Amino acid sequence: MIMRTVMFMGKGGTGKTSAALATGVVASELGHKTLVISGDAAHSIPDALGMEVGSEPTRMAQNFYVMEVDSRHELEKNWGEIRDYMSAFLATKVDEELAAELAQMPGIDELLGVLKLEEESGKWDFVVLDSAPTGQALRFLAVPELMGKLGFNLIKVQKSVMKLLKPMEAMLPFPVPDEGVYEQAESMVNRLKKAGSLMRDASISSIRLMVNPEKLSVLQARRNYTFMSLFGFNVDMVVINRFFPQGAGPYLEKWNAIQSQYASEVETSFYPIPVKRVRFFGTEMVGLDNLREMGKEIYGEQDPTRVFFKGRSFYVERTKEGYLLKVQVPFTTKGDVDLEQDGDDLNVSVKMPVGRYERSIALPSVLSGKVAKSASLKEGYLEVVFSRVLR
Ligand SMILES: Nc1ncnc2c1ncn2[C@@H]1O[C@H](COP(=O)(O)OP(=O)(O)OP(=O)(O)O)[C@@H](O)[C@H]1O
Ligand SMILES: [Mg+2]
């Protein structure tokens, strides 16, 4: 069975929930057995559908199912014992309230949607996740790799040592974890490992970036894209949502100009990933009919379960001198490259016979504080050399 997953990612309010549902509606009507998962505590899915949604897959139409992650329950199930132990351990050092606060792992709740997606993935043709976690949460997916086999074995060794210590707990300066804590840790690491490999498989999982044609949302999408590329998640589409119609009077004329400018910025920033445009509808995206219309606007006659793009257009390589940033560009001609570094952004401008190519790149953490020294064009890639040392 072909199985596909799609996650929508973008700044608050850009239209992720609408797009996730729209994608689900179109896919299910093409005959794919589809589940849309919401990890969003704001319960926007039932609002958008105008129907009740449960924490188990709920049927909305033929082939179309929706569920909301019960985050309290899932958090308890996946993380409760570990959190309670951490909190008890920390309480031997700081006061109880602070310990409870510190034991909350930021981002862990955001990850629940991804874990659920992995859990459900075998049962459906197509699973769409609304409210994709931020980069912060996705870092957890790298934990199993960082731990390696040694890490897994350490959990096992610790588990047996702690079992021996348990009877002497009263004499020890720290609480001894129960077996359940280790079991939960092992199971969590295993689940992260499975979710990580599912999400990194470009033929199964795609990220779709949602932007509005405005400054902050484009900025955030660029950052998301940098992060996703570095961690090996495949972004296969960018959707620009809420285009005002052309010719709707002088009031919107200025907006038309602003929006087209951001749209072309998006086209260059994410090249060669396909960019789709969705107009600002005259009504909110509520109900299956509106969602279907939005879906048609995103996908046209295409099947939403397709992989629309596969590949990395952005790399960082370590070299002897420092780092090399390689970015795919839509031309191969030679040209003069100008660089301007502005904090963690790199502005690139290439003068070509036909005009100027300008692009801003959100630099990944590994390059922050490093200095871009030179740049050149090679076989469709812009290569920027970064020095290793701070100046
Ligand atoms: N193209 C559009 N035309 C008209 N209304 C839209 C469009 N896209 C989204 N909306 C409306 O904008 C509001 C926000 O959209 P949505 O809930 O999909 O965004 P979101 O990115 O999921 O937000 P959040 O970050 O809060 O979860 C909703 O009321 C939705 O119906
Ligand atoms: Mg939403």
Image: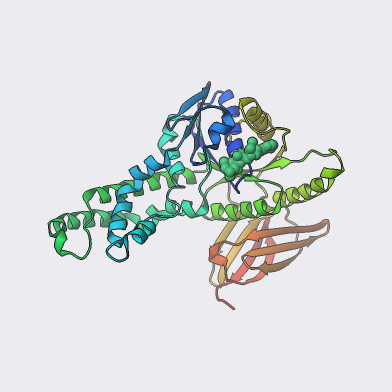
Residue 85 visible, this orientation: yes
Q: How many marks?
A: 0
Residue 104, how many percent across, how many down? 39, 54
Tell me where residue 20 sits by quadrant: top right
Looking at the image, which residue is at 55% across and 55% down? Answer: 227
Quadrant of the rendered image holding ligand 2: top right
Residue 51, how many percent across, how many down? 54, 27
Tell me where residue 208 sits by quadrant: top right
Residue at the extreme bottom of the image, as rendered: 391
Nearest the viewer among 201 and 191 is: 191
Nearest the viewer among 364 and 103 is: 103
How are the colours assigned in the image?
Answer: rainbow
Residue 92, how many percent across, how many down? 27, 64
Nearest the viewer among 24 and 327 is: 24
Q: For this view, does 206 lie left or right of residue 258?
A: left
Residue 282, how many percent across, how many down? 73, 33
Residue 208 visible, this orientation: no
Residue at the extreme top of the image, as rendered: 62
Looking at the image, which residue is at 18% across and 58% down? Answer: 161
Determine whether 297 is above or below 371 in the image.
Answer: above
Nearest the viewer among 95 and 183 is: 95
